[in-house]
Amino acid sequence: MTLDAPELAPAMRPGQFALLRDPAIFDPYLRRTAWFYRIENERVACTLPARDPLAARVRPGDLLDALAPLGRAIEFDAKERRILLVSEGARVAPLIAIADSAVAQQREVVLVSRSADAFPSHLLAPEIEYRTDADALSAELIAWADAMVASGSDETYHALADAARAARYRIEPGWARVLIDLPMPCGAGECYACGVDTLRGVQRACVDGPAFDLSDLDRRRR
């Protein structure tokens, strides 16, 4: 979904999202979470699940009410030059913005999808190495990466944690971040509908995330 939003385009950062609603109707009543995907001049490209009622009804030219940018952006420090991005199915979308930003900063980027048909590779920047390996959790890639960001299910995150411990002996704090995809109806952290249980206590995905340190989530699980 591409929005004409010249005032919003310069403000969006990788890892952030928007909350959308149709101001002409209250069905669906709650705002929908749209993940930031790419900037196209003064347009902001976001993604919604194909079966979402808003995505199914909206048509070109419709006016949408958007709250954005929301969430904490994902940034890398100077020593993180090799970036591993791991996706599962359609959840690859927010990783595209992260990959594009990392390439623009002259970092090496490997994007791995655990689903062979998750994203058309010809739409990626040529500098991004795209893999659709059956086993996306190879020890070689995990050992290679200075930093990792993943977007998928809890099962994928558990598998990543186990693979990281096997390849790196432990999960260093700050090395891996995972995106939590939960309903975030208010976007302000007031309703706690997006509460995430972490080592630091309950965090809110809409304001404290949506990316969380894998070490905080994994140690909590153990």
Image: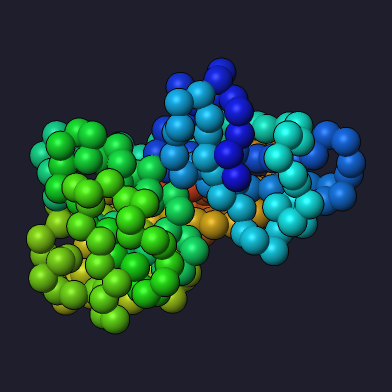
Q: Quadrant of the C terminus?
A: bottom left
Question: Horizontal and vertical percent for residue 190?
Answer: 68, 39
Q: What residue appears at the point 89 percent right and 44 percent down from the top-left corner? A: 26
Please, is residue 134 above or below residue 76 in the view? below
The percent position of residue 152, horizontal first and vertical second, equals: 44, 65
Q: Is residue 124 left or right of residue 38?
A: left
Q: Is residue 194 left or right of residue 16?
A: right
Q: 101 and 70: which one is in front?
A: 101
Position in image of residue 132 (x %, y %): 29, 72
As rendered, which of 49 and 75 lies closer to the eye? Answer: 49
- The residue lying at 16 percent from left, 42 percent from top is 107
Decide if residue 184 is on the left or right side of residue 208.
Answer: right
Q: Nearer the viewer, residue 174 or 221?
A: 174
State the quadrant of the N terminus. Answer: top right
> In the image, is residue 80 above or below residue 155?
above
Colour mode? rainbow
Q: Residue at x 61, y 53 (%)?
A: 48
Q: Quadrant of residue 104?
A: top left
- Residue extending farthest to the bottom is 134
Rendered location of residue 94, percent (x, y): 44, 49
